[in-house]
Amino acid sequence: MVNETQHTCNASSSSRSEGGSSSGSESSKDNSRCSTPVLDADRHERLREKMRRRQEAGDKWFSLEFFPPRTANAAVNLISRFDRMGAGGPLFIDVTWHPAGDPGSDKETSSMIIANTAVNYCGLETILHMTCCNQTKDDITGHLQKAKRLGLKNIMALRGDPAGEEWEEEVDGFNYAVDLVKHIRNEFDDYFDICVAGYPKGHPEAESYEADLRHLKEKVFAGADFIITQLFFQPETFLKFMKDCQAIGITCPIIPGIFPIQGYHSLRQLVKLSKLEVPQEIKDVIEPIKDNDAAIRNYGVELAVSMCRELLDSGMVHGLHFYTLNREVATTEVLKRLGIWKEDPRRPLPWAVSAHPKRRVEDVRPIFWASRPKSYIYRTQEWDDFPNGRWGNSSSPAFGELKDYYLFYLKSKSPREELLKMWGEELTGEESVFEVFTCYITGEPNRNGYKVTCMPWNDDPLATETNLLKDQLEKVNRRGILTINSQPNINGKPSTDPIVGWGPSGGYVFQKAYLEFFTSSEIVTALLKVLKKYELRVNYHIVNVKGQNITNAPDLQPNAVTWGIFPGREIIQPTVVDPVSFLSWKDEAFALWIEQWAKLYEEESPSRMIIQYIHDNYYLVNLVDNDFPLENCLWQVVEDTFELLN
Amino acid sequence: MVNETQHTCNASSSSRSEGGSSSGSESSKDNSRCSTPVLDADRHERLREKMRRRQEAGDKWFSLEFFPPRTANAAVNLISRFDRMGAGGPLFIDVTWHPAGDPGSDKETSSMIIANTAVNYCGLETILHMTCCNQTKDDITGHLQKAKRLGLKNIMALRGDPAGEEWEEEVDGFNYAVDLVKHIRNEFDDYFDICVAGYPKGHPEAESYEADLRHLKEKVFAGADFIITQLFFQPETFLKFMKDCQAIGITCPIIPGIFPIQGYHSLRQLVKLSKLEVPQEIKDVIEPIKDNDAAIRNYGVELAVSMCRELLDSGMVHGLHFYTLNREVATTEVLKRLGIWKEDPRRPLPWAVSAHPKRRVEDVRPIFWASRPKSYIYRTQEWDDFPNGRWGNSSSPAFGELKDYYLFYLKSKSPREELLKMWGEELTGEESVFEVFTCYITGEPNRNGYKVTCMPWNDDPLATETNLLKDQLEKVNRRGILTINSQPNINGKPSTDPIVGWGPSGGYVFQKAYLEFFTSSEIVTALLKVLKKYELRVNYHIVNVKGQNITNAPDLQPNAVTWGIFPGREIIQPTVVDPVSFLSWKDEAFALWIEQWAKLYEEESPSRMIIQYIHDNYYLVNLVDNDFPLENCLWQVVEDTFELLN
């Protein structure tokens, strides 16, 4: 309810001024869905181009609006929601500007930082709202510069709420959204795509519906690229508005704002603040069921679906914008029923591409951060370049320091109590740790009946792909090979394969088998003997927390472990085992033992000392089986090691 | 006999002064033969490092000495010999300095240009001899600068012949080889590896054997990296010399110069000029068989083999240097019998890597020049960069102009008469042209009984790999699909495969099927209809001499058609179909019709007009089947096209 209450404020503040309408985002994941297999072209397109191309292709789309949450914990949850809702393929998401929440600051909950996270860490095309009322030119320019620096490329230009009741125009000030549009175009030329708000019933403060249409035309002629409307309750409202816009010469895209009714109270509050009138036939349905939340939501979904169908069927509407209220269920259901929620196994690359303009061209990453992509992006955010020069063109990059590590979006999503239930209130020895790893792999409840759904090195349950290795992983974890990352070998599966596929269709994807784990020095000693037999086939890196490093990798060259061959393209090799990055990852991987696990327990407690012992004495090992067309030999390597120990 | 006579002069001139000894070259092809699969490390090594590494590995090697030929035609032949003898894996070759032949000039036959061709076009590690006697400091510096500019990295520093009988030392002049060694080190620091000559029997002009050893020591201490000796007839001679060198503190490698006796007259002349004495037991064998060339050569081979064995068995000798006299048979036979001729199907890349320091890192080339690699290297010699930025780091390269085309090493190796026999004294229509292409493919004699062993686009008979496609190629050429380049698809063969393998062992190589041909506009019209069915599978470029260009390639991106996956490495994709280069290749490919074929005939003759017609009206087509794991569909495409035409 926190979210909803907060939203109501937010929606209200925006609907009282111009801020009520907003916009959404196309996951870069979406690129591979286009009929033409063009990987790179898509990744460089502006939002307005994407919109145009979708319209030309007759391809319907949707977008999602969110508001910044109030607490850091809520922000962590919202980001998971971005990831989940991003999977459905929004063309964009947008983040409202929350003047009371220090929106341009570096706070975890500011509009700016939430939008930054969406674009950079979740790979979502993102529009940042911005209001101009009661702000100096310098403030506004500062916000815009910061947005640009963070990789944001789209702004929703709004007036915002005047402070106090007795608002008066300032001479030469920012009095209306049109002033902000002009300012952006003056100062930033064509860098940003600009969106403005439209009011299907006219703005409540406008002299008339016609006068409001003229204001809208001014905003568009000042340089706005498209319009998102305030919510409305009947499709006719929007369709009439659209025709009226066209009649006075507004030709840019106009996207209807859809508000699926999700509860009685939120609707009442919204209506009060937005000065919109709920049609009598809707009131007649809702009043009798006002205490039945489920019934109201079902009705809201029905209503939204039928309205959206009518809009799409009109032929005038190509995209739908959803006011989500930061909630997932109702909007997702509407989208699924409309058939425009497109969860697609195909990814442009095996990992989520950042939507940051500079990072969009990135096509190679070290495998180590496979389960911690946000940490990887964060720690490399200052780079233009991969250590071995494969993306961008700057020189001598270095991974960000581990101190940055505590930032909220790298935090575990689970509170301490939950982690203790998963990872053990009390550890009795190294074996209890082996058990935690094993339960995470198998998905079975631990001895206290709790499922282990995450680990310090893995934010989420086991990937579908890793599931292919489940039986073997279980066996080795039980015996103290504590796996944190692995992939099976793949010898040319179609790029459309639902589990391992990525990239444009018509291609083939390949992998070398990979296994990464912590293990004791006793096991490492035996492993090294066994590895002699596999010298020409298996590459290894073995390192402890002090940095003692054993490897048979030639020089410091990366080993490509995931690659794809596509029609009419060069070869893409998105995942490598890079010896340079491994030493940075090592610091992070060992630190996670302490920061995320040991610190759950009292200092000096036996549980804490067990984790500390592992941190101090275990080795981090990675193995690559280079012979990808043959059966993965890494399990045999581990088997041989255990045999040698017996 | 021209070669031999010429050599005798050359050998004599050098043995009278210091010039008699010389050195050889390691083909870059050799890199993949090392036990460690290190592709890149090898390609950056200096000659002295390669020598050291071979010695440490207990790996015996050889090198080959050549002299610059007198005529352009002889130069073209010598270059083919470089290619053939390069296949045996010499550590290096060397080219003698021929003062009478304007050795530093840009003539096709100059020492400088022959060495340039060896290093840049044949990919051979090359030592250029240089003499200093009777030359100014500026001349010498100029030669060295030019050598450096051309990519030569090794100099054999010699005194050379004094002009006239009454030679006197010049004060501050270049009187001895040691002066040249000092000069190179002063002016070029450590850039060049420097070799000097050693005399196992002492230099004929030296006061004594001991005095000559002291001179040698001076040369080494002035900065020489290794020594190659004058020829000798008995292994003891060399082994004693080597011990004496070591005794006075010469520790650098000393490489014995081996001279397989190849004829009675050449031996006599050599002996006269070098003032060496032929041991009585050799004279005793040779005199009775002096008119039997074959017998003498067999004896020469026997003698050389047994001497080399003794040297290698001594444990003091790691490499053997051969005075080839620009001849192939005797030296090759000695090397094969010694077991150090290592014709190895493994190549570091599917094409011959240039030994030029800048180009050694090149790891991608357009497929179009597959049969004309020298032309490709020549036309891109000013680049640091591939059009799509895959090698080097300079910007906006452009292919060299076609006017450069007439340079001797791009010439056909066959004289006009031979070409007419192969390609027809008189053409009666387009069908006679189809026949020529067909005979080239099948290897069968043409209607006049001559085999077609080359074509304007193909310097050599069909590659082994292309042989795999022979039957299909024959069929389509008969019907006017005039193929000039093709490769089969390959789905992961071992990198050690004798036909298609390349790169370090333990890897896998892949190819997309490729077909390139000239054909009539009638066939192109049908082909384009057929290609619609294959739109997602086959990429094509179709262009005529006027540059009308039809393609379904996305943007201007290269399509990788050969790639390899190796242990502990990134993916290597050495051959691409690059749309940018294709338009340059098109100019060259069409021009070859006129320059190499039409011009064989009189102006206005029917034969010439037939070729001119084809040049003006045919299209150049390339097709790539992207679906490399499936059966090559390009034959079906052609089949469908013929069917449509019927």
Image (tube, coloured by chain):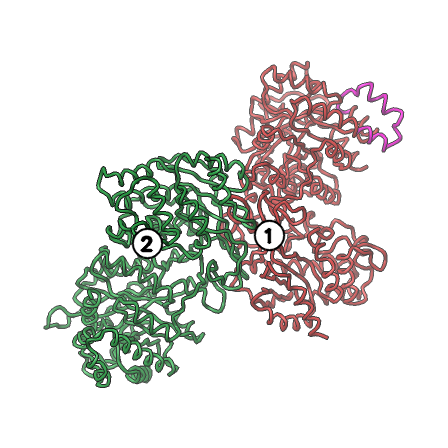
Chain colours: A green, B red
User: Label 1 lies in what chain?
Assistant: B
Of residue B502 and residue B212, the one placed in the foreground of this image is: B502
Q: Is residue B55 visible?
A: yes
Dot 2 and dot 1 residues touching (CB under 8 Å)? no
Same chain letter for marks 2 and 1: no
Residue B441 locus on image (x, y percent):
75, 57
Residue B439 locus on image (x, y percent):
78, 58
Q: Residues within 10 Å of mark 1 (few under 14, many from 20)?
A: many
Name the element at disc 1. strand
Where does the magenta region start and end?
A: B272-300
Amino acid at circle 1: Gly
Query: From the viewer's perspective, is residue B66 above or below residue B466?
Result: above
Residue A207 locus on image (x, y percent):
18, 82
Amino acid at circle 2: Lys
Q: Quadrant of the N terminus of chain A?
A: bottom left
Circle 1 sits on which residue? B492
Name the element at disc 2. loop
Q: What is the C-alpha distance between the residues marked 2 and 1?
A: 42 Å
In which image quadrant can residue A433 be found? top left
